[in-house]
Amino acid sequence: MPLSDLVASNAILPALKVNNKKQALHELAARAAALTGQSERAIFDILMQREKLGSTAVGNGIAIPHGKMPNLTRLFGLFARLDRPVDFEALDGQPVDLIFLLLAPEGAGADHLKALARVARLLRDPTIAHKLRASHDAEALYAVLAMPSASAA
């Protein structure tokens, strides 16, 4: 199953300009709020609470901030390629330039974990990560994320 079932073509930010992790999460929360109808503040707070448990940076310049929202009806994904990498307190010490935000309904349970695992597997693929870094517009980024081969990752 490609990631196109998690992320819509209008939920791609090809060159997000931010200076730090908090600003990145704030910008992602604002965009997610506009697309989901959820409260920007609530999304931001949930993301920040999750980061306090430990960084959602998974290494190799990739972060997957995520959280559960009480009023969300389905899984929601948003992908951002940062204009320039920022420190995300990753275990490998590498700055992050690829971020996949994942929001789930509060009762999502296993679906939330399966979606997280799918996103992590895909983005950890060096070929996919390279293609995402080499793509400079939303259509190209979406095409990489929605590729049928992305489902095999």
Image (cartoon, grey):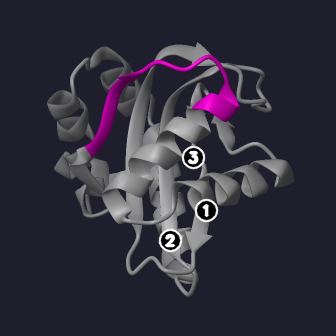
Magenta-colored span: 11-23
**Residue shown at 61%/62% (left/top)?**
42
Q: Badge 1 is on which residue? A: 42
Residue at the extreme bottom of the image, as rendered: 107
Helix, strand or loop for disc 1: helix
- The first of marks 3 and 1 along the sequence is 1
Q: Badge 3 is on which residue? A: 64
Q: CA distance from mark 2 to mark 1?
A: 13 Å
Helix, strand or loop for disc 2: strand
- Relative to 74, residue 15 above or below: above
Q: CA distance from mark 3 to mark 2?
A: 13 Å
Label 3 close to label 2 by CB (< 8 Å): no
Question: How would you rate the neighbour count of disc 2 (Cα within 10 Å): few for under 14, some for 14-19, many for 20 or more?
Answer: many
Is residue 124 visible in the rendered structure shown here? no
Q: Badge 2 is on which residue? A: 104
Question: Percent from the top left, x then y, of residue 139?
Answer: 15, 33
Question: Percent from the top left, x then y, of residue 78?
Answer: 39, 48
Q: Amino acid at mark 1?
A: Ala
Is residue 107 visible in the rendered structure shown here? yes
Question: How would you rate the neighbour count of disc 1 (Cα within 10 Å): few for under 14, some for 14-19, many for 20 or more?
Answer: some
- The first of marks 2 and 1 along the sequence is 1
Residue 142, by quadrant, is top left
Question: Percent from the top left, x then y, of residue 13?
Answer: 34, 33
**Residue shown at 21%/23% (left/top)?**
137
Numbered label attached to residue 74: none
- The first of marks 3 and 2 along the sequence is 3
Q: CA distance from mark 3 to mark 1?
A: 18 Å
The quadrant of the rendering that contains the N terminus is bottom left
Residue placed most toward the observer, 104 or 38: 38
